[in-house]
Amino acid sequence: MPPPADIVKVAIEWPGAFPKLMEIDQKKPLSAIIKEVCDGWSLGSNENFALQIADSTNFYITEKNRNNIKNGSILRLTTSPVSRGTKFCFLIRDLIQICVNIPVCVLFLFFLTLQYQTALQLHERIQSSSMDAKLEALKDLANASRDITFAQEFINLDGISLLTQMVESGTDFGDLLSFTLTAFVELMDHGIVSWDTFSVAFIKKIASYVNKAAMDTAVLQRSLAILESMVLNSQDLYHKVAQEITIGQLIPHLQGTDQDIQTYTVAVINALFLKAPEEKRQEMAHILAQKQLRSIILTNVIRNPTPINDEMAHQLYVLQVLNFNLLEDRMMTKMDPQDQAQRDIIFELRRIAFDVECEPNNSGSIEKRKSMYTRDYKKLGFINHVNPAVDFTQIPPGMLALDNMLYFARHHQDAYIRIVLENSSREDKHECPFGRSSIELTKMLCEILKVGELPSENCHDFHPMFFTHDRSFEEFFCICIQLLNKTWKEMRATSEDFNKVRGPTLSFRVKVEMQRCCSHYAQTGRSRV
């Protein structure tokens, strides 16, 4: 004999318990059915529970849709969404309909009471001995923690300490640990609790998740996010994190395919770079170069078929700015005309350009030697032909301009000699003064690349070429000085036109051409100048 049409046979799940087979009488109120299920598992307060379909939809069973339950359906007993906060919305609606004159402060206090009750329940549930029940509670906590009012109530219950103790115990793994860290991150993002309050044991445990060769992706991502926040928000924690994490341990996370992990990894490197004492930054830059960080980013991120998202673009921009800022000291250092070592650099520029050796003191009269030097310094395009060291007393760009010129002369010698000799053989009025141009170009590049400025929070403009060369600023200069010379010839400029070429016309062209040439260089390793 077939069962009555109003009777539906189903299975009902509850975390930590064996599924229960039962018959549901569709003529009974839904609340009575939920009470019967709760009584079967000795769960009190049945009004705090609900039934939902145990499939990908997870929709809740209500009086309106209960007829959709079919024989053989699998249901899940779960915490009622009403008890988790939506009940407040319905209560507010009913209160407004019944009595519009209730003071706002009363409603607000009622809301706080509900948030406190929710926080208290979750505080108890995440300590459950049932792993399934604990996991569900941690999922709920991770979601609820986005709300600052709930976060305040949970933190007031010493919830942050409870979460850190759970992490330090080392007993949770996988999803349990992932949702624990997610809830922690969400709570800390509200800025209610100081980062300085965490123990060394907690820092070591978080760092250990990053240092492991194989780690759950979600756990790794959240651990990297926590380390970044620790470093950025506390100078004391910076030193503690720096003792636990090395660049070598972070590099492997850039060699994977998960762009989110790569982004968080670069963010941690940037945070360590930004917070490092000034005297340590050059040392850190040297370590990054030794570990071939730029090459790894170029191969695994920039040249990866996956498009670079905005957050990764921002982190690459920050890394670029922090590295370029290492040049600020040279940019703001004036040349000392009496410093022989600095003067020797100018002699080296002359020697490479004209293939001459420094004459010994007895080679001709002093006046003759001075005349030769003056002649050659004029050909090199310095403003002060007698003592070109004076040209580098302007800051910015200071000694950085001289560094660029020497790099160009040594590493792109043919192009350097060609530019100098080409201009020295022109008529005076059409020569492009190499020295003067180099100083102005270096200053322009410092402005374009924002040397000495802190990274902007909303900027995503990174130059791929930066990741192709450890001396990328100097390579920028080498490309652009050739562009400047090319522009000078095309405009048939004269010395009187220098400011015009150097100004808006050149500035615009340099920016456009630099982007074109540097993009080509980043892809091929060859300049198009």
Image (cartoon, rainbow, N blue to C red):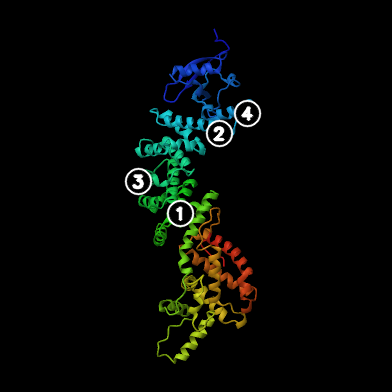
Which of the 4 quarters of the picture holds residue 97? top right
Q: What type is the residue that disc 3 sits on?
A: Val
Residue tagged 3:
200
Which of the 4 quarters of the picture holds residue 27? top right
The residue lying toward the viewer, choosing from 346 and 51, is 51
Q: CA distance from mark 4 to mark 3?
A: 51 Å
Q: Identify whether 262 is placed above or below 388.
A: above
Q: Secondary structure at mark 1?
A: helix
Q: Identify whether 93 is placed above or below 318.
A: above
Q: CA distance from mark 1 to mark 3?
A: 22 Å
Residue 482 placed where, x, y %? Answer: 56, 71
> Badge 4: few (under 14), some or many (20 or more) residues near its Cα, within 10 Å?
few
Q: Secondary structure at mark 4?
A: helix
Q: Nearer the viewer, mark 1 or mark 3?
A: 3
Question: Residue 96 has which mark?
Answer: 4
Q: CA distance from mark 1 to mark 2?
A: 42 Å
Q: CA distance from mark 1 to mark 4?
A: 51 Å
Q: What type is the residue that disc 4 sits on?
A: Ile
Q: Nearer the viewer, mark 1 or mark 4?
A: 4
Residue tagged 1:
270
Q: Identify whether 155 is placed above or below 227.
A: above
Residue tagged 2:
108
